[in-house]
Image: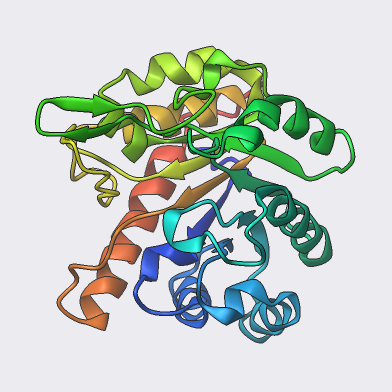
């Protein structure tokens, strides 16, 4: 068996509502190759020096930074979305992370949305850090669907340099995730691995517990010599205890490593 060089990281969002420090602790304890820092309301996630100290203390590198793009992070770092991306890039460069994950704008961020495609291209040309734009999903309420993102939730409609695919978002979108991967081609730079059942909720299940082709995607990455990172971004909020959360994250890591293994070396 050949185990490819792809690094498997833990998103600090996977331990929410616990804090960023817990994400580093569990990544080190369970044997993850690194972390992706979700920049959110936890002050430590916003502090480059605090993150560096955590990384050094636990011996866990920071492989990616997730820019604060969520509704709950509208005031993190700034209310200006471009300032957020500039700061995310600076944090990634200082911490040695190779990717910044960014969501497409909300539709009500009209000026930002109009400038987004061109602006991301400009920023991508100013750094070695990959700006990996993440697929999202339509918002649904009962039988109604709202397009919340602009230019759109399907990022393959635009010519971004790099993409993140999130399989939980693909499940919520009710699309064929592997077809999206094919459209992304060699611009696929980053993976958010989580499962989903196809419900209207963004579930972020442990891989293997839903209906998404998590195993098939990992096997595809191993066969094709993928040079990005695989990040477990799962929801453990329903874990009954810290021990259960730890077991879930250990299961997620074991699933990922198993399916990244290939019968022969990629040539």
What is the quadrant of residue 171 in the picture? top left
Q: Residue at horizontal 52%, vertical 67%?
A: 40
Q: Residue at horizontal 72%, vertical 48%?
A: 82
Q: Residue at horizontal 53%, vertical 57%?
A: 9
Residue 246 higher or lower than 112, as above or below: below
Q: Foreground: 100 or 211? A: 100
Camera sees residue 189: no
Please give left or right for residue 251 compared with residue 111 in the image: left
Q: Position of residue 25 (x, y in %)?
A: 49, 81
Camera sees residue 241: yes
Q: Position of residue 119 (x, y in %)?
A: 76, 32
Q: Residue furthest right?
A: 126
Q: Residue furthest left?
A: 142
For the C terminus, give its image quadrant: top right
What is the quadrant of residue 26 in the picture? bottom left
Q: Residue at horizontal 77%, vertical 66%?
A: 95
Q: Position of residue 159 (x, y in %)?
A: 67, 17
Please give left or right for residue 143 compared with residue 266 in the image: left
What is the quadrant of residue 116 in the picture? top right
How many badges with numbers are in the image? 0
Q: Position of residue 215 (x, y in %)?
A: 34, 34
Residue 206 higher or lower than 4, as above or below: below
Q: Foreground: 221 or 103? A: 103
Please give left or right for residue 36 compared with residue 175 in the image: right
């Amino acid at each position: 068996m050949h185990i490819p060089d792809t690094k498997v990281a833990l998103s600090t969002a996977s331990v929410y509502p616990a804090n960023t420090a817990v994400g580093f602790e569990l990544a080190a304890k369970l044997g993850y190759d690194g972390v992706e820092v979700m920049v959110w309301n936890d002050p430590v996630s916003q502090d480059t020096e605090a993150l560096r100290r955590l990384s050094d203390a636990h011996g866990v590198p920071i492989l990616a930074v997730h820019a604060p793009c969520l509704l709950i992070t509208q005031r993190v770092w700034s209310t200006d979305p471009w300032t957020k991306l500039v700061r995310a890039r600076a944090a990634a460069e200082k911490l040695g992370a190779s990717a910044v994950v960014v969501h497409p704008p909300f539709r009500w961020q009209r000026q930002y949305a109009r400038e987004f495609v061109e602006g991301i291209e400009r920023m991508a040309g100013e750094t070695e850090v990959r700006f990996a734009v993440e697929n999202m999903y339509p918002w649904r309420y009962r039988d109604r669907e709202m397009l919340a993102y602009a230019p759109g939730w399907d990022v393959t409609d635009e010519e971004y340099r790099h993409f993140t695919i999130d399989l939980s978002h693909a499940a919520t979108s009710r699309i064929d995730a592997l077809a999206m991967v094919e459209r992304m081609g060699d611009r696929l730079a980053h993976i958010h691995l989580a499962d989903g059942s196809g419900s209207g909720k963004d579930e972020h299940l442990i891989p293997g517990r839903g209906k998404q082709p998590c195993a098939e995607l990992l096997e595809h990455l191993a066969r094709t010599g993928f040079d990005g990172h695989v990040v477990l971004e799962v929801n453990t909020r329903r874990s009954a205890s810290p021990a259960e959360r730890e077991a879930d994250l250990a299961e997620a890591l074991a699933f990922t490593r198993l399916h990244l293994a290939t019968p022969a070396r990629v040539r």
